């Protein structure tokens, strides 16, 4: 079977991304095999003034490789200088509707947080392969900053692709990373990643009816870049594409949210 590549480019202001459609497994191996086997490095994208200028060729190669099971990195790795705790100030600086609103409550909640500084702490921990984010700790802190109370978060560094959030009303939400690409600057001053996260939310109605309802499926596509300013300061930009179902393509998103963060090392 012969694969077909389809790509669509979107740009707004200084932001520019290329989204590549699905390829057949055979075609991906034929195109990327020499790069993956020989270990030829892709070029690293540079940080622009707003941290979002692309090296499009390198990004396409990394994204295509992440579509092949087993070739996506097993976690996002950061410079070792990230290890430890950081105080974060994060602000939603942009909310863009890309299609009809799929979730009015979510849209209103995001708009209510726009231009407000959210403060919380984040933590990066050592692992045998390098430095990773402590996703359980970071999610707990972020939910608290968003005024989400009484949540229970479960995650393990040995299985970093699955994170579970339990809500006080009995809902359970599983967040599963199914596609990922990441890179780090050779001098350790920059890092970036993209992740596609499938979200399955199960209501607790089954405990009353005896019949478990079907989970509600949605997804997020994240792109994040970090820049080390100095030994105690890091800046980041995060783009979040909100999808109505599990289609792993940002062009199907109905909302895009832009976050700007500044991290200061905890003394």
Image: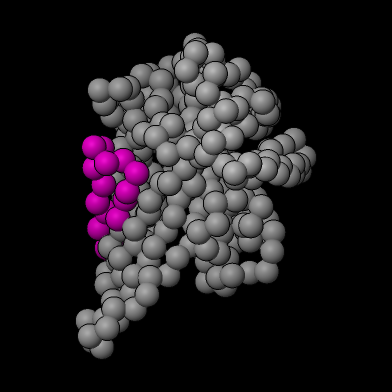
Q: Is residue 144 left or right of residue 246?
A: left
* Extreme-bottom residue of the structure: 209
Residue drawn at x 64%, y 57% is: 252
Instruction: Relative to 103, say whether 13 is above or below.
Output: above
Tell which of 66 and 257 is nearer to you: 66
User: Between residues 217 and 145, which one lies in front from this camera angle?
Assistant: 217
Tell which of 134 and 76 is nearer to you: 76
Image point (42%, 59%), residue name:
199
Q: Quadrant of the C terminus?
A: top left
- Rendered residue at 25%/22% (across/down): 128
> Left or right: where does residue 31 sit relative to residue 140?
right
* Viewer can see residue 91: no
Residue 85 highlighted magenta (yes or no): no
Percent across and percent down for residue 250 are 61, 50
Dominant secondary structure, magenta: strand
Q: Position of residue 183 (x, y in %)?
A: 50, 25
Which image quarter holds the N terminus? top right
Residue 96 in view in this figure: yes
The image quarter containing residue 216 is bottom left
Q: How many marks?
A: 0
Q: Answer left or right for 210 relative to 247.
A: left
Q: Nearer the viewer, residue 163 or 231?
A: 163
Q: Position of residue 135 (x, y in %)?
A: 33, 42
Q: Name the residue located 69 percent from the left edge and 64 percent from the top edge.
A: 99
Q: Quadrant of residue 158?
A: top left
249 to the left or right of 186: right
Q: Give the answer, above or below, for where 191 lies relative to 137.
A: above
Give the residues drawn in magenta, as a range: 149-164
């Amino acid at each position: 079977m012969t694969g077909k590549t389809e790509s669509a480019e979107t740009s707004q202001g200084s932001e520019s991304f290329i989204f590549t459609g699905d390829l057949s497994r055979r075609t991906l191996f034929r195109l990327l095999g020499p790069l993956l086997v020989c270990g030829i490095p892709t070029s690293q994208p540079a940080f622009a003034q707003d941290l979002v200028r692309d090296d499009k060729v390198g990004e396409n190669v990394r994204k295509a490789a992440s579509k092949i099971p087993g070739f996506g990195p097993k976690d996002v790795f950061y410079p070792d200088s990230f290890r430890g705790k950081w105080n974060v100030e994060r602000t939603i600086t942009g909310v863009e509707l890309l299609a009809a609103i799929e979730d009015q409550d979510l849209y209103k909640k995001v708009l209510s947080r726009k231009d407000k500084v959210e403060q919380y702490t984040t933590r990066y921990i050592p692992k045998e392969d390098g430095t990773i984010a402590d996703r359980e700790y970071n999610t707990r802190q972020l939910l608290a900053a968003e005024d989400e109370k009484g949540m229970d978060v479960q995650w393990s560094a040995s299985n970093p692709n699955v994170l579970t959030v339990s809500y006080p009303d009995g809902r359970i939400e599983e967040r599963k990373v199914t596609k990922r690409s990441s890179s780090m600057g050779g001098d350790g001053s920059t890092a970036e990643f993209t992740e596609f996260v499938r979200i399955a939310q199960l209501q607790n109605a089954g405990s009353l009816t005896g019949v478990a309802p079907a989970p509600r499926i949605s997804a997020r596509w994240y792109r994040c870049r970090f820049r080390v300013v100095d030994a105690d300061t890091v800046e980041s930009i995060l783009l979040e594409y909100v999808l109505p179902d599990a289609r792993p393509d940002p062009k199907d998103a109905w909302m895009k949210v832009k976050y700007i963060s500044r991290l200061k090392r905890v003394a």
